[in-house]
Image: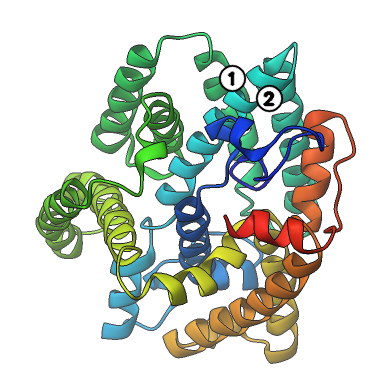
Amino acid sequence: MSWNGVGDVGTIDGNRPRSAVPRARQRIVALDVLRGFALCGILLANVKPIAHRGGELGTAHLAETTAATVLHLLVDQRFFPIFSLLFGVGFSLLLESAQARARQPRVVLLRRMLALLAVGLLHFLLLWKGDILTVYAVLGLLVLLPSTWLPRRVVAIAAGVLIVLSVALLGGGYTVIPGLFLLGSALTRYGVVRSIGSGPRTTAVSGLVLALAAVPATVIQLRAGTGSAAARIAYPAAGLLTAGAYVCGLLLLLRTRLAGPLTAVLRPLGRMALTNYLTATVLVLAISGVVGDADRWSVGAVVAVAAAVLVVQWGWSVVWLRRCHQGPVEWLWRWVTWWQRPPLRRSGRRGAAADRA
């Protein structure tokens, strides 16, 4: 079970053919690619905060240059919404899988959130105070798990209300996560996720609308004074709109000749997103310990550190996934989720072919 909760392709328990596998159990490659893409942006945003062992990245941590402003407008608040949406998607995909396999599917989800909470607390206490996993686990327990008893229409309406309230009244940030969780869950329950590879015209129109709407919001964010009422609304609004445009743009690119290279680069990172999220903290802290004086890091240094970490993680992910079904932390997470030890090592060509499907 990967970071998004999507099951393995192939056979179930060794005796059910792939054709009998519920669609919720089959890996959706685009989700892995999107997750890998979001992971790259989140790391870029987190390099400085991790080096400082806390806080959020902002232009205050960088020299006030054009490059810093561009980085701020392209990255900050633009990638964690994608991850939050995907978390809600994965939760509902796992629910579908659990309903087909377990007598008490919500107990499976409960174990999964509690395991994530334990991992997040360890990450928070031992490595970095800016950990997001604890927040995801708590909100998963408080928002996503109860939503499984609600009709999908109610979940969709609640998602819209929570997102609007977060942007209009609460300034975005962590407050937008519950709405994005529910939005991802609603998209899954309405079948939108399963048709993610179809309807390029709809994707293109949606991406264009989101991009055009993001422009004025970004301009207001840039011109409004920090802390002003306009900035408090424009900042999260621009982030959400840009994130949506990023998603649509990447989905369109996956229908072009760039699909192969993008999948080769981003999918391994996405399939081991939890492992890579945790190890990124270790790697950035190690680099900052050697280089030192993170306050003086330029935008170029931040990008270089993020690139170095991603190169290491991509190589590690590719090598590991050639031999194993999933990343080490993902494997442990799945073990606790299902309360049953899953296979880790691949069994020849069959496992590799399944993951390519």
Across the whole image, how many numbered discs are drawn on residues? 2
Position in image of residue 221 (x %, y %):
20, 58
Please give left or right for residue 79 compared with residue 223 in the image.
right
Task: Indicate which disc residue 109 carries.
Answer: 2
What residue does disc 1 label?
A: 145
The correct choice, above or below, for 71 with respect to 34 in the image is below
Query: Under tag 1, what secondary structure?
Result: helix
Position in image of residue 278 (x %, y %):
71, 60
Position in image of residue 342 (x %, y %):
85, 42
The alpha-carbon separation of the residues under discs 2 and 1 comes to 7 Å
The residue depicted at 90 percent of the width and 39 percent of the height is 341
Query: Under tag 2, what secondary structure?
Result: helix
The correct choice, above or below, for 56 with respect to 264 in the image is above
Q: Is residue 252 visible?
A: yes
- Upstream in sequence: badge 2 or badge 1: 2
| Dot 2 crowding, Cα within 10 Å, few <14, some 14–19, many 20+ | many
- 15 and 221: which one is in front? 15
For residue 188, which quarter of the picture?
top left
The residue depicted at 60 percent of the width and 66 percent of the height is 269
